[in-house]
Image: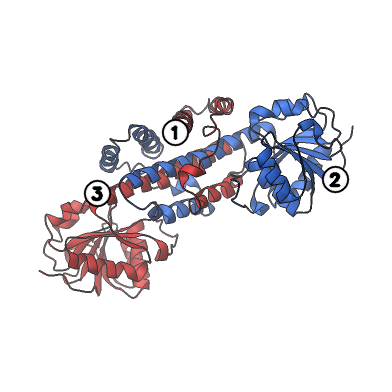
Chain colours: A red, B blue
């Protein structure tokens, strides 16, 4: 069956961070969200009331004639969700960075990926305008339709195949989750030493801003960049009470030293 | 000898990133920079012309009556510089995050630390207004004098002893240098796979902005946070050609898993 040219009605599966942010963004742009299903009834009720749509307590109760079904669940649940959407006539997409489109294609002709590359937290409203939305469709018609929809909420829509999307997701984990873990380590060490973490805020902001002006390879500074072994040794001593953090300090410093000084 | 109450004249030692940023910021606030010495004659000439002061080609030619001498050199050179400033009557400070004040105190009565906590790159102008400046003085009079000077260029002046400053510097390395190394890894992996690094810019910015709203421990998301071993395994496979990056991915993921799931 041929996919429709335009998406008028959408059903959402999921009620977590991505489902919430995406539903709100779509609804705000006039896209009709028909209904929401999530095993987390409290969350889905809340989300449905926020955007003024139905919520259903069983996936088979979802409207069977929506133009689009957006699966915004944890990756491991996508497989089960698909099995319950085999009969729908609309396009089925997931929002995962790392799941290839092939899993959907096995069961559903008109399918795709709608991956918004951002970190979402319920309660923290984000402006979708600049968020990259990575689109992949099972055929050109689906790709076009998804791109049109994405264009409504973002100025940064790209068509990307599954392999490239996986690499993008991998690097997103590095610059977001791993960076946040470094913030978390810093927060803990400063707390233990009664130093205000907010002293690091301007540095954290400037570090992130620099990518607009200079590629990261040229922005690298610090003791390891200079192979300043005295300072590195001092820092390792300071981390004697934090053996796990010491491992990170060593590994990253050694890599930077190698990259710039060997 | 008692230090003067206010600093009217300053001599700068160094012409690198910190020396340049600090000299310009002080001069812009009306502080009189008298002269600059740096073994890098080209750099120091350039900097001296920028702020309209003398440059000297030997440290012993520096004005001997400045109220303040700011040593903004690599840490390992501070010791040598001090030996050449033993006779001056003004206050001598360094700008290092990790050098304790004790090294200065051995030779100079009125001394201190003037540590601006930011990443500086020549050519990239920064607004000092929000940059934390960490002050330490050999006595209260020096501390007050340095604080007054710092207040002229920043709204974020804190008095911090050497031990706390060391921890602050250690964590600054983590959130700045190590984070930038993660950006650099991401940049390289994406380049190899012909994916535009700028797709990560909004995520990088949001990750850094989140610290204003939520502590890093609560902001943690991602596969390791969820103990999503399938995705982690996929990412490790993608990194098969990057054994060094794979080590970082494993180490950081395991720490996050341990922190949130064990």
The image shows residue B88 at horizontal and vertical percentages of 84, 32
Give the secondary structure at mark 3.
helix
Residue indicated by mark 2: B6
Q: First in sequence: mark 3 or mark 1?
A: 3
Residue indicated by mark 3: A163
Residue indicated by mark 1: A259
The image shows residue A60 at horizontal and vertical percentages of 16, 63
Using the image, name the chain to which the residue with label 2 belongs. Answer: B
Residue A167 seen from this side: yes
Image marks 2 and 1: residues in contact by CB distance under 8 Å: no
**Closer to the camera, A51 or A4?**
A4
Looking at the image, which residue is at 85% across and 35% down? B64
Residue B116 seen from this side: no
What is the CA distance from the residue labelled 3 to the residue labelled 1? 27 Å
Which quadrant of the figure has residue B168?
A: top right
Using the image, name the chain to which the residue with label 3 belongs. Answer: A
């Amino acid at each position: 069956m041929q996919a429709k040219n335009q998406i008028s009605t959408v059903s959402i599966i999921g009620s977590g961070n991505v489902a919430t942010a995406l539903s709100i963004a779509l609804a705000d742009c006039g896209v009709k969200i028909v209904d929401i299903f999530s095993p987390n009834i409290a969350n889905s009720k809340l989300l449905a009331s926020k955007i003024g749509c139905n919520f259903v307590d069983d996936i088979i109760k979802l409207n069977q004639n929506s133009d689009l079904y957006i699966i915004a669940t944890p990756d491991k649940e996508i497989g089960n969700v698909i099995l319950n959407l085999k009969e729908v006539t609309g396009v089925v997409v997931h929002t995962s960075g790392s799941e290839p489109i092939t899993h959907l294609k096995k069961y559903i002709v008109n399918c795709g990926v709608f991956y918004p590359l951002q970190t979402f937290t319920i309660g923290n409203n984000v402006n979708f305008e600049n968020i990259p939305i990575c689109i992949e469709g099972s055929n050109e018609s689906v790709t076009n339709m998804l791109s049109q929809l994405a264009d409504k909420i973002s100025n940064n829509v790209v068509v990307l195949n599954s392999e490239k999307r996986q690499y993008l997701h991998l690097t997103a984990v590095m610059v977001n989750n791993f960076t946040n873990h470094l913030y978390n380590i810093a927060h803990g060490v400063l707390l233990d030493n009664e130093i205000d973490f907010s002293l690091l805020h301007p540095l954290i902001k400037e570090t992130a801003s620099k990518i607009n002006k200079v590629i990261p390879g040229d922005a690298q500074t610090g003791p390891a960049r200079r192979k300043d072994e005295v300072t590195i040794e001092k820092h390792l001593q300071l981390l004697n009470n934090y053996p796990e953090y010491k491992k990170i300090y060593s590994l990253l410093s050694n890599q930077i030293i190698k990259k710039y000084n060997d």
